[in-house]
Image (cartoon, rainbow, N blue to C red):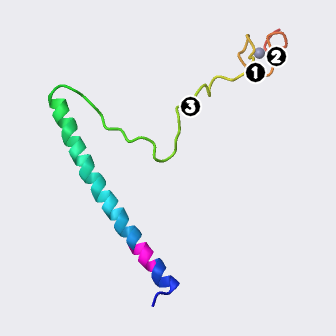
Amino acid sequence: MSSLADTLEKLKKLDDERAKLVESSKSALLNSVQDNLAALADLGFSYELVATGSSSRSRAPKSKDKPSGRVCSICGQSGHNSRTCPKKK
Ligand SMILES: [Zn+2]
């Protein structure tokens, strides 16, 4: 009776049940939070509920468009300087 397949099947059902319980708890909690936020808004306090990164922790890209190192003061490109700039005649 208690074969591995049975156990796995049981675990899968428990996982499903757990997911459902988590989801319903979450929506119940979120609803009460939203109610409280609405009450706060009535009092003139504006708050926003923001979910913080449970998934990818991507910070704002920092200085990606600013090339590190020296850039040419004539054309603004890296790899050479104003003395060796190809745009300079
Ligand atoms: Zn240049």
Q: CA distance from mark 1 to mark 2?
A: 12 Å
Q: What residue is disc 1 on?
A: 78
User: Disc 2 and disc 3: Cα gap in Å?
Assistant: 31 Å
Q: Position of residue 63 (x, y in %)?
A: 61, 25
**x and y percentages locating residue 55 in the rendered image:** 48, 47
Crowding around mark 2 (Cα neighbors within 10 Å: few <14, some 14 to 19, many 20+) is few
Q: Residue at 34% across / 68% down in the picture?
A: 17
Q: Is residue 14 magenta?
A: no
Q: Quadrant of ligand 1?
A: top right
Against 60, is 84 above or below? above
- Residue at image position (84%, 9%) is 83
**Circle 2 residue:** 86
Q: Which residues are magenta?
A: 9-13
- What is the three-letter code of the residue carrying label 1? Ser
For this orientation, the residue located farthest to the right is 84
Residue wearing tag 3: 61
